[in-house]
Structure formats: structure tokens, C-alpha cells
Image (tube, rainbow, N blue to C red):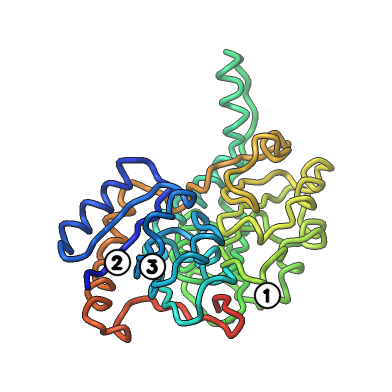
Amino acid sequence: MTTRLLLLLALPPAVRETYLQRLRSSFPDVHIDLVDHHSKVDPYIEDAEILITFGPMTSERVFERAHRLKWVQALGTGTDGITDRPSLAPHVLVTNVRGVHGDAMSEAALMLMLALSRQLPRSLECQARHSWERFPARLLTGKTAGIVGVGVIAEDLAPKCKAFGMRVVGVTSGVRPLAGFDEMLPRAALTEVAARVDFLILLTPYSPSTHGLVNAAVLSAMKPSAYLINLARGGVVDEAALLRALQDKRIAGAALDVFATEPLPADSPLWSAPNVIVTAHQGGFHDEYPARALPIIEENIRHFVAGRFDRMLNRVERAADGRGG
């Protein structure tokens, strides 16, 4: 019987076609379908053995109807939206593309730190008004970055922060010494770390244990001159508490790439909150992403078709309640 694969990709058409044509060329014996929204899966999902997607692009209905599904290949590192779906059958294997995001996410973090420090949105507003205004920038040199969630991306980011003359503190559930970090502290020390950093950068995976991790207490502990940068998942931040902190000027500002609800609703007050940069989940999205992700996907498809499931890359361990570890 022909293996059937479904690509569920809410991406620009050219990017979707890159995945589709590459996989069809590499696996002519695999039947591959493509849809651009979870509402369009019905003609294909019941027969699909393989689903390739990003977790935030799925819905509960996708997995409720996936009766023959054996494997989900997540196109990101995080598997929220997949492993936390109650309807995902326990036997379904989940893999991700961990390891391909370091450059893009590090560059995004540095770009956002520089944009906040140099008040880039203010300059763009002045440009739009044809208004010549000068104001002092803040330097990254000598500042402290607190990175919450120390995985592959943080390991790439920390030395780059050091190259700017910054001090780097890591907050992690697995404390260990790593190059580029001046300190490494447990997650229980988050509030203490928040009180002394100039940038609190969120890279931690989303899970029940990190839901609302950055809450009112953490935000209240931050210095009035400090910035929050969220490149993790929206659910890691208590957005209502963040909005209050911004409106009350308890922190200097924030750069937000991810949100509890995506796309961010047009009426969300975060769009116009003071000193906030909003980007549309762009942190890891770049021109070379398919070229970096596809070799992992192709190797996993080869192993899957051959029945060598134990050789598949980046297998995600799922807890007894069906959530990712």
C-alpha cells in the first residue's frame, strides 16, 4: 500500500511549494498532499500516515480525524499544538527539527535588543512624519542578558551576546556549565535573575510547567530600564500582567514575536502598547529554513518507509498524559 503524507503548511505559496516539490522529487513512491490551513485537511487526513506541520498550524479536529496517522514531523523545535492535543493517539511518533534554529533565533534576539536599545520604532515614526529628532541610544556593551531556557538556540546566542561585551546569565531546568554564560541558575531563581538583567530573553519551550512562567511577580522584579524579549511561545508570558507592566512603565519595553493567540487579534492592546515591537512569529522563519529542515525530514521519511523507526532523528518523548517532555 502506498504511504500517504500530508503537508499542512500555512506558509507563503512559494515556501509551501519548495517543501512539496522537494519531497515529491525525493520520494516518488510516497503520495503527498498539501493544504494551507487546518480547515482544509478533511479530504486527506483520514488516510494520512505522515503529517508534516508546525504545531501552531494544527487544530484538535486534525488529530480527531487522523485514524491512520503513525508519525508527525514537527517543522519547529517546539511540539506544542501536537503533543498536547488530547486527540493525538498515544502510539503516534513525534519528531522535530531541533538544531536548525540557532542562527536565525540568535540574530532575531540581537536585532530586537539593538532595536529596543536604539529606539528604532521611534526613528521610524519620525521618518514617517518627516521629523528630524535626535536622542541618545543605549549601548549593549556592559549590559546583562538573562536567557530563560538554555538549549541549542541559547548555546548559539550566548557567545554572540559576549561578542557585544554583554554579561550573560542562563536560567534553566538543567543547570550545567556552558561556554558563553557567566552564570547558570535554576528556574526557581527566575525572579532574582529578572531583578538584575537589562534584557530578559525567553527561549524556553512551552509546556504546562512553563505556562505563565513570566508572571506579574517576575515583571515587577524587573528594573524600570529593562526589556522583555519573547521568542519562545506566547503562553510562557502572562500577557495581561505584561500589558499592565508596560502601561504603568514598570519596564522599559518589550519585543514580542509570539503570542497566546496567533495571529494576534487586530483588537489586541499589545499592538499599540507603549514601547513594544510586535513581529509575526518571525524569529526562526528565514530564507534558508527549508534547506536546513528538509535533510532531517528526508532522512526520517527514508527510515519510516523502511520501518526503521528507532533510527529516526529528533524523536520527542511524550509524557504519560500525552504532553511533550
As drawn, is 205 to the left or to the right of 295? right
- Residue 143 % position (x, y): 62, 55
Decide which of 212, 246 is in the foreground and name it.
212
Residue drawn at point x = 66 percent, y = 46 percent: 254
Identify the residue under disc 3: 73
The earlier-in-sequence mark between 1 and 3 is 3
As drawn, is 91 to the left or to the right of 199? left
Q: Is residue 150 visible?
A: no
- Residue 306 % position (x, y): 21, 80
At label 2, which amino acid type do we have? Ile
- For the residues carrying marks 1 and 3, which lies nearer the camera in this image? 3
Identify the residue under disc 2: 297
At label 3, which amino acid type do we have? Gln
Identify the residue under disc 1: 187
As drawn, is 196 to the left or to the right of 164? right
Decide which of 12, 124 is in the foreground and name it.
12
Secondary element type, mark 1:
helix
Find out whether the residues at labels 2 and 1 contact each other: C-beta distance under 8 Å: no
Q: Is residue 265 above or below residue 202?
A: above
Q: Is residue 281 above or below residue 182?
A: above
Mark 2 Cα-neighbour bin, 10 Å: few <14, some 14–19, many ≥20: many
Find out whether the residues at labels 2 and 3 contact each other: C-beta distance under 8 Å: yes
Decide which of 13, 97 is in the foreground and name it.
13
Q: Is residue 110 visible?
A: yes
Find out whether the residues at labels 1 and 3 contact each other: C-beta distance under 8 Å: no
